[in-house]
Amino acid sequence: MPKLQARRAVTLGIATAALAMAVEAVAAPLAIAPAPGIRLQSYHAYGSMRRQTVAVATPATFAIPVEIPEGARLIGGLAVPDQVWKTSVVDQATPLRFRVSFRSGDDTIVLYDRVIDIRARTDDRRWFDFGRDLSALAGRRGELEFATTAVGDATTSPLALWSVPELARCPEAGPSLLLITLDAMRADHQSGVGYPRATTPHLDAFGADATRFTAAYAAAPKTIPSIPQTLTGRYFPAHGPVAALAPLLGPGRFGRRRAIVNNPHVSRWLDAQEPGFDVRTTGELDAHAITSEALRFLSAAGRCRTALYLHYLEPHTPYRPPARYARKFVDLAKPTTLGLTFDDVTAAWQGRYGAVDRQRIVDLYDGTIAFVDRQLGRLFRGLARRGRLDDTIVIVTADHGEEFWEHGQFFHGQSLFDELLHVPLIIRLPRAGRAHIVDDVVSTVDIVPTILDAAGFPPATTDGLSLVPAIRRATGHDDTRVVFATVSDAEPRTPFRHAVRSGRTKLIRHIHDGALATYDLASDPAERQPDATPPDARELRSVLDAVRLRIAGTGYQVRLDSRLPHETSYVLTISGASPASDEDDAPSPVKLLDVDRLTLEASDTVQIGRHATSLTVRGKLHGGDDDHLRFDIPATIGTLRITLTLDEDAAPSGAIRLGATSHPDDTPIDLANDALDEPPARQPVGADTKPPPPVTVTLWRVPIARGAAVPPPPSPEEEARLRALGYLD
């Protein structure tokens, strides 16, 4: 088929859909029909999450009929992939020209023209996002033509990728959003809050024109669940497809939405959310690469209202700052077994480093902070040069801190002490007035309600509070706020715990045995010695119980009942298993999360297995007694197995029940079994009407939204990255 005919075939196939595009839409993907050599597909390239693309075999041209609305902007992207079917094609790649034109009658206006040569130029091995202001063409009808041709001789038809182009209208409808989370960034390592080293001069300069919250605390000491908590405003984010990000990213919010992250945990969680960010750029991106990608996105978006989320991996392990930052704080005269990098987290866990080596590790941590701070300064300058700073809600915070042996350990996730929970929080609102410092206790779950309030969006049900009144000085000092934190997704070194804190006192509850530890932060800010009688312990206990009640009656419920006249010792084990599957479609592991002991006695213990795939309860039952606990399971495919021993002997037949029905002993429980959704009954239902055994264990599920919005298990490549980051030992 001649080239001109091919172009016309594509054009005629989409004319009706394109011209029917609603002019009130803030951003609308242009309708494109597949044709020979042109196909619509989701494509993964250059570390980016899958984009919806128009994949073409060069040479190729497709055209889209349009009527240009007022204030329109064309937004798109393009790339030459470096791999096809996981095979590198760089050495065989041909330079390709990408050209976008507007044709109307005899007029042809070139809007974009670029040659990409991934073989000769390493910088070309990426996505190129572009934006073009079409205001001068408002009201005109014509075609947007997207053409790809080879530069020089091409013996094959090279693959070229276009992001599905969008025609965006950019009315001045409200502020944009720039949300930044720094991984493992301690609040007390900012030079602007008294740290003696000049780690954050650029962030300090930005904070001088913003509101700094000096008592901000993450809701968890690990990336997961901290990032889901931050992005949903919930202490216990739902594990199913409940549109968790809809209040922030739903219809009528931001026209252009991009996430650029360098943490496999964050990228996998974001990829499971719908609605979510339009494009999620991930991979081994250092702070310079993330900032460069962000500035390119902002340039392409022009004046369109955007939501940009950046998660900088620095200063997370491994500590490998550029040489100038690695040397910035180290004392090279001190003998040490470490050089100018640090990556052996396991050795640090195992206590192999002495005092000098430990100081070198802190020095390198500070060097990574200085490196990312330099890139933040570059980002803020770029935002100002594009004229967007004064129309953008800018928030800088962290997912958690880092422990440097303050309580005998290294890394994060292992406790709920302040070195892991106290994080930076700097907020700059458009036209918010003079900058100031707020010392009130606040939480990262306050970020979403603050964004909704500042952006003019409807409020949502969250566990947080809007900080806009404090930023605008509409409220006085509040010393009554209490915030919550939890450890979930347990490993042997990160046991389940809950905590609440006020400005003066912290209370930590251990799920293992229900023990409580309280700390008077006024007299013991380093949390070295538990205090049995802090002044507001009773009030904190009430707040903790109120937070726990929010999920107590949801998810999976387990109850042991005894009708014996004497005390009985028991051991209950619940373990999960995923069915075998192909590697590319592996189901999520059956993890038992957000475990809580509801009516267990003080002497009863709950032990969480490795990676939270099992739990074991050891306790005692009395006649008429019941022991009750709850947990969540994100997976929807898989099985559970329950075993029960009584006084060290196997429980009698019929002791295990699902909802109102009995369950055969030693038979795995399918998570798809509808019996789990039936409320429990004291007497089994069905043909078997024999009285139940004197001790029974009943499992049921309070129906909640469940389904596919669960991150899949990590791929081998992701496991390798997680191991390098110190997550997998």
Image (tube, rainbow, N blue to C red):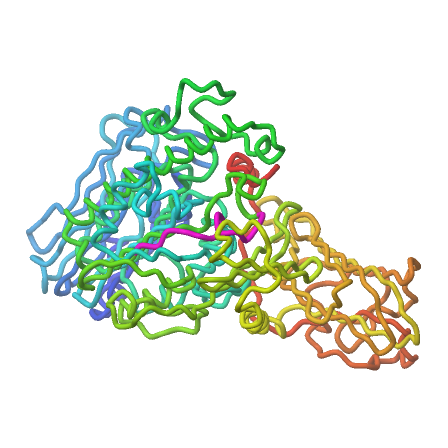
Quadrant containing the N terminus is: top left
Q: Which residues are magenta?
A: 414-426
- In the image, 325: left or right of 378? right
Residue 702 is left or right of residue 385, and the answer is right
* Residue drawn at point x = 36 percent, y = 74 percent: 459
Expressed as whole percent of the image width and height from the top left, the position of residue 551 reads: 58, 71
- Of 725 and 633, nearer the camera is 725
What quarter of the picture does the C terminus occupy?
Answer: top right
Q: Is residue 19 above or below residue 200?
A: below
Residue 196 quadrant: top left
- The number of numbered discs placed on residues in the rendered structure image is 0
The x and y percentages for residue 426 are 31, 54
Quadrant of residue 439 within the rendered picture: bottom left
Up/down of 459 relative to 103, above or below: below
24 w.r.t. 82: above or below: below
Residue in the image at 26% along x and 72% along y: 474
Q: Closer to the camera, 343 or 199?
A: 199
Q: Is residue 197 visible?
A: yes
Residue 429: horizontal and vertical position, in percent?
Answer: 24, 61
Is residue 6 at all visible to an observer of this figure?
no
